Image (spheres, grey):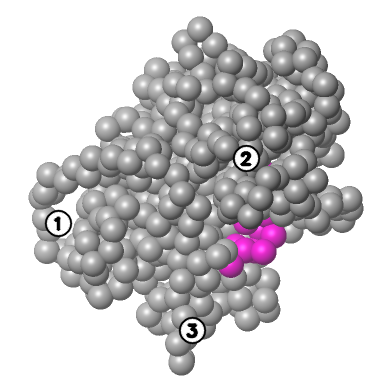
Amino acid sequence: MEIAPRELSLQEKLNILADAAKYDVACTSSGSSRKGKKGHLGNAVADGICHSFSSDGRCVSLLKILLSNECIFDCKYCLNRSSNDRVRTTFTPEEICTLVIEFYRRNYIEGLFLSSGIVKSPTYTMELMYQTIYLLRTKHHFNGYIHVKAIPGAPEELITNMGYLADRMSVNLELPTIDGLKELAPHKNPKTLVKPIRQIQNGIVEHRLAIGKDPQMERSSHNRYLRSTIFEKNPFRRLESYKSLGSSMQQKLPSAGKSAPFVPAGQSTQMIVGATGENDLQLLSTTQKLYQQYDLKRVFFSAYVPLNEDSALPALGTAPPLLREHRLYQADWLLRFYGFHAEELLSVDRPNFNIMLDPKCDWALRHLEMFPVEVNRASYETLLRVPGIGTKSAYRIVKARRQGMLNFDHLKKIGVVLKRAKYFITCGGKMMYRIRVEEDFITRQLIGEDAKQNWEIDHPQSYRQLSLFDDYNFQSEVTVEDSQKSLLGQM
């Protein structure tokens, strides 16, 4: 571990700790509303305060930094692992407050994403993070969006107090299997990782019940049309009570007050894709369990960028599996909004997606006995399983056909992606063209139509993730229709 040879300036610390934070993609701002208050700075908007997203899914209008890049752990995949020779530095709580307030006043940012390496101990690190957020909320009256990482192994009191100050909290699982953690992060205990996730969930449930709301987090408004999803049952199990903290720590921690909502934007996590040998079924099954049993708001996937030389990792220079990451995000949408289950999309015999096809097409081609679907008679749930029909377009079909028979021109106006849907639907008993309903034929057609897009995803101009100071001068020819469908998750 290389120690800074001199006291670093605030700008130098910012350069180091903003760059060190860019590999954490579990960063989103949707889901929390807080109106502006007289004498306070900023607010939060549930529909998403971040207006610009990078290609890897990060919100680029958040100040995204680490409290520290020092770490007592030696996780093989991490750039900040203890065995790497790097300049190490740590912000003070007041330095972070200064950055947030000054950046906000200049309209550079609209919120804060704060994570950290483990400095000295989980408790010490979480104390520093709590002091930072407490100062922001009370001394500086910052009323904007804040996302904070909960440090596994930190005392319950610290995590609970933080939950009353932050909009969103997250605990990164990093790897979906115990074997993967043993191989790449032997210092991390799976039970220690899961414990704060359950604690945050229980805190959210208790607060929602106390104010008379449904204990589950609110999701897409379109879910009211979808029954028997993976959210149908949620076993809310209470944590056993922890031993109370010593009086000395109680004195050091100012109370946030219990009148505030507890983690109102929910919690998220991140899993690395491609660092170990886990297949897509293992990643998706873990994702489904997190939604079912822990009611997470989002699970993020991060294509592994080789950073360290190690026999247990992909070789340096290996391209990150960006297209595979993209397919997992599409499958995640299918779990959350389309009523699919992981065991439907994949199986032990076929544990990985065909990365040349989107997961819904991949599933449909293996279940051609269910197609073609007559759009004028099919149920809403059945329509959602048709490639090219999303949640909004399925609802519009159900509503529009009450007025009369629909044809393909109607479907195009409704927003159905006919270049995919045409192989799987009929209107009035007729297909759009004479199409052979055969797996090999349709597969070739779909792969050919998406070949350019797939190549662009897997071969970006650069897969180096953006930092606060990057300016690539991107030029894009994305259509309005594509932008809308991307934002709404229409597949």
Q: Residue 39: give x, y in percent of width and height.
A: 46, 91
Where is residue 157, by image quadrant?
A: bottom left
Upstream in the sequence, badge 3 or badge 1? Answer: 3
- On whether residue 53 falls in the magenta region, the answer is yes
Q: Nearer the viewer, residue 141 or 447?
A: 447
Q: Residues within 10 Å of mark 2 (few under 14, many from 20)?
A: many
- On whether residue 282 falls in the magenta region, the answer is no
The numbered disc on residue 245 is 1
Magenta span? 49-63
Q: Main secondary structure of the magenta part?
A: loop
Q: Nearer the viewer, residue 283 or 484?
A: 484
Q: Residue 259: give x, y in percent of width and height.
A: 25, 75
Q: Nearer the viewer, residue 207 or 447?
A: 447
Q: Determine whether label 2 and label 3 are within 8 Å by CB.
A: no
Q: Residues within 10 Å of mark 3 (few under 14, many from 20)?
A: some
Q: Residue flagged by tag 1: what amino acid is it?
A: Leu
The numbered disc on residue 36 is 3
Name the residue that disc number 2 marks. 376
Q: Secondary structure at mark 1?
A: loop
